[in-house]
Image (cartoon, rainbow, N blue to C red):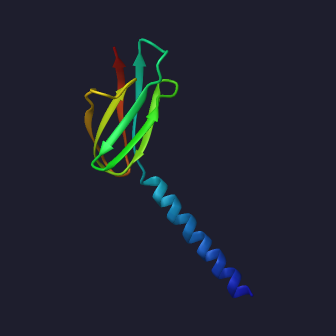
Amino acid sequence: MDKTVATFIGVVCVVIGLHASRAMHRTNITGKVKAFTEKDSIWVFAVNGKDSLKTMVNNGRFRFTVKPGSWMVTVAPHAENQEGKLVEAVEGSTLDMGTIILN
């Protein structure tokens, strides 16, 4: 019985350690959006090959957790025909895009 409990505690510790390590290596893209009209919902899109993400701006801010690599980030009330910015997300770091002003 003691051996089983010790094995269980060991496995739990290893799983917790792996999750903590993974959380420390997350890659993020963040930024602020300043818009002159608050009526429209503002969406942020991030595209990397076949991977795509979208999030709504909340209190003027956005955040994506992404895989490392090049991402095309587009901010717009309506994403059609909008140019984005190509950014490079480095593993384990947070890329702050600063403040993006929409006209």
Residue 41 pos. (x, y %): 47, 23
Specify the quadrant that holds the C terminus.
top left
Left or right? Give the position of 41 relative to 91.
Answer: right
In this view, the residue farthest toward the top is 36
Left or right? Give the position of 38 relative to 92.
Answer: right
Given residues 69 and 19, the one toward you in this image is 69
Q: Is residue 13 above or below residue 72?
A: below
Given residues 87 and 74, the one toward you in this image is 74
In this view, the residue farthest toward the front is 80
Which residue corresponds to the image point at 65% horizontal and 75% vertical from the top-left? 9
Residue 94 pos. (x, y %): 38, 42
In this view, the residue farthest toward the right is 1
Which residue corresponds to the image point at 62% horizontal and 71% vertical from the top-left? 12
Q: Is residue 12 above or below residue 84?
A: below
Specify the quadrant that holds the N terminus.
bottom right
Which residue corresponds to the image point at 42% horizontal and 26% vertical from the top-left? 32
Q: In which quarter of the image is residue 55?
A: top left
For the image, the number of numbered tags is: 0
Given residues 48 and 79, the one toward you in this image is 79
Residue 95 pos. (x, y %): 35, 39
